Image (cartoon, rainbow, N blue to C red):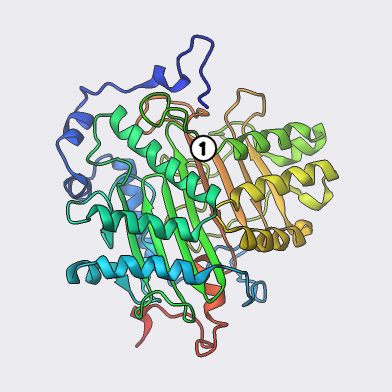
């Protein structure tokens, strides 16, 4: 359901932008490719352009994985049967392959170890044009439906509904700013990894990415890794049109606040690493215009993120239960059997799991929080406007993400354990 103010007007409505500004009049005339080309060649807006240039530098680094201190901790992940219904997923993915034209196949199917795994991003700019884009004229209705069927087969029912809602909210934003050719319900790219195609016995995976929804899935037999992923919304609800009432990220938001408010004052003080959302005490680089407070977004595959805040195992049992509820919500994309195993794994590390907070924690306050351990990182952040014009963070613009640190992203840690791949992971460009 929507969350209107006392006046009956959704909170974000007071921040609708002036669509007569050049930014929007120009955007309205462009398709996704023209829009991206103008951005890459023109350098506007400069803050995103500078970030993109930095991303390209980060991409040149060989994959290592997110760590807390720059050192990858081994032995955290193992090959096991997680009960994934791989036959149904492979059948759905092979349906997509059968519908691809020869030209589409060249753009869509990559080697398992291709560096393109790492070129997803969450802004609306089509910065990495690979795979099929579901809103393109050369993607038939049948192919689009088949691609969505891969998501449906791979994710839990509630996870699939969440992904679809994020896509619909993106379409709603595109309509709000008069640029549906750039942002719409299907402005998302789909890419397959694994030269021999989807398989029930060999490793493979897919990437599905676009504005505010990026999913990276790796499969090996009955095992699955869905990491990294990014999910956001601006606004986080639809208050008009055929999908009115759609809203996402409510559990992550409400439970995070409930956890912080439940802590004793001295524990709150230790968890709250910065009082202000853009705090003068933050070191250079701790905040940027696009990522704002979150640390592990696009291209941050090797970031060093020191532990901060309070240790979860030292919290009262009721607070630990709220941490578990938050983590479970972040794991909701996963099929039930995988989700249960992953949650149990996370709980085993509560003595090494940290919870930290940025901002105040009154009912109306925007905030950031992170839960971090050797086997998971989740981040939640309220943002200022990108398309809406709220200068300060607001609860109707949310970014969330999940990483598997210590080499776990993209199933990398598991790849080295697969028989025949014991030498570990190599990028194609490193095979010299």
* 197, above or below 60, in the image: below
**Relative horizontal placement of residue 334, taking residue 127 as reference (left or right):** right
Q: Residues within 10 Å of mark 1 (few under 14, many from 20)?
A: many
Rendered residue at 67%/29% (across/down): 361
The residue singled out by tag 1 in the image is: 248
Q: Which residue appears farthest toward the bottom when viewing the image? A: 420
Q: Which residue appears farthest toward the top when viewing the image? A: 7
Can residue 298 be seen here? The reply is yes
Rendered residue at 22%/31% (across/down): 23
- Return the x and y of residue 248 as percentages of the image width and height: 51, 37
Closer to the camera in the image, 280 or 428? 428
- Return the x and y of residue 291 as percentages of the image width and height: 45, 44
Q: Quadrant of residue 271?
A: top right
**Relative horizontal placement of residue 316, taking residue 188 as reference (left or right):** right
Q: Quadrant of residue 262?
A: top right
**Relative horizontal placement of residue 156, taking residue 178 as reference (left or right):** right
Q: Secondary structure at mark 1?
A: loop
Closer to the camera in the image, 165 or 208? 165
Rendered residue at 37%/81% (across/down): 430
Closer to the camera in the image, 412 or 60? 412
């Amino acid at each position: 359901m929507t969350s209107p103010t006392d006046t009956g007007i959704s909170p974000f409505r007071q921040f609708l932008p002036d669509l007569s500004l050049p930014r929007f009049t120009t955007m309205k005339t462009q398709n996704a490719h023209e829009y991206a080309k103008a951005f890459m060649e023109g350098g506007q807006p400069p803050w995103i352009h500078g970030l993109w240039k930095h991303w390209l530098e980060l991409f040149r680094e060989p994959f290592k994985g997110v760590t807390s201190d720059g050192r990858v901790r081994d032995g955290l992940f193992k090959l096991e049967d997680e009960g994934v219904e791989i036959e149904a997923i492979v059948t759905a993915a092979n349906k997509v392959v059968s519908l691809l034209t020869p030209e589409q196949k060249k753009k869509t199917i990559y080697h398992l170890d291709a560096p393109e795994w790492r070129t997803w991003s969450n802004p609306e700019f089509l910065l990495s044009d690979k795979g099929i884009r579901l809103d393109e004229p050369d993607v038939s209705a049948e192919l689009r439906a088949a691609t969505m069927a891969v998501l449906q087969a791979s994710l839990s029912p509630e996870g699939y509904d969440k992904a679809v809602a994020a896509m619909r909210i993106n379409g709603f934003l595109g309509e709000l700013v008069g640029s549906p050719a750039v942002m719409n319900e299907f402005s998302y790219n789909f890419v397959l990894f694994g030269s021999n195609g989807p398989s029930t016995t060999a490793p493979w995976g897919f990437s599905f990415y676009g504005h505010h929804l990026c999913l990276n899935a790796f499969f090996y037999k009955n095992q699955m890794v869905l990491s990294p992923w990014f999910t956001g919304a601006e606004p986080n609800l639809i208050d008009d049109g055929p999908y009115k009432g759609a809203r996402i990220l409510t559990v992550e938001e409400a439970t995070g606040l409930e956890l912080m408010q439940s802590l004793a004052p001295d524990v709150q003080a230790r968890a709250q690493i910065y009082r202000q959302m853009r705090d003068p005490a933050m070191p250079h680089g701790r905040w940027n215009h696009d990522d704002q407070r979150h640390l592990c977004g696009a291209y941050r595959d090797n970031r060093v993120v020191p532990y901060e805040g309070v240790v979860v195992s030292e919290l009262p049992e009721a607070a630990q239960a709220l941490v578990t509820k938050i983590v479970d919500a972040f794991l909701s994309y996963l099929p039930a059997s995988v989700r249960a195993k992953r949650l149990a794994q996370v709980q085993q590390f509560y003595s090494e799991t940290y919870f930290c907070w940025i901002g105040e924690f009154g009912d109306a306050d925007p905030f950031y929080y992170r839960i971090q351990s050797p086997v998971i990182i989740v981040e939640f952040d309220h943002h200022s406007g990108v398309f809406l014009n709220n200068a300060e963070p607001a609860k109707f613009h949310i970014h969330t993400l999940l990483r598997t640190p210590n080499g776990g992203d993209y199933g990398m840690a598991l790849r080295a354990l697969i028989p025949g791949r014991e030498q570990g992971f190599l990028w194609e460009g490193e095979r010299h």
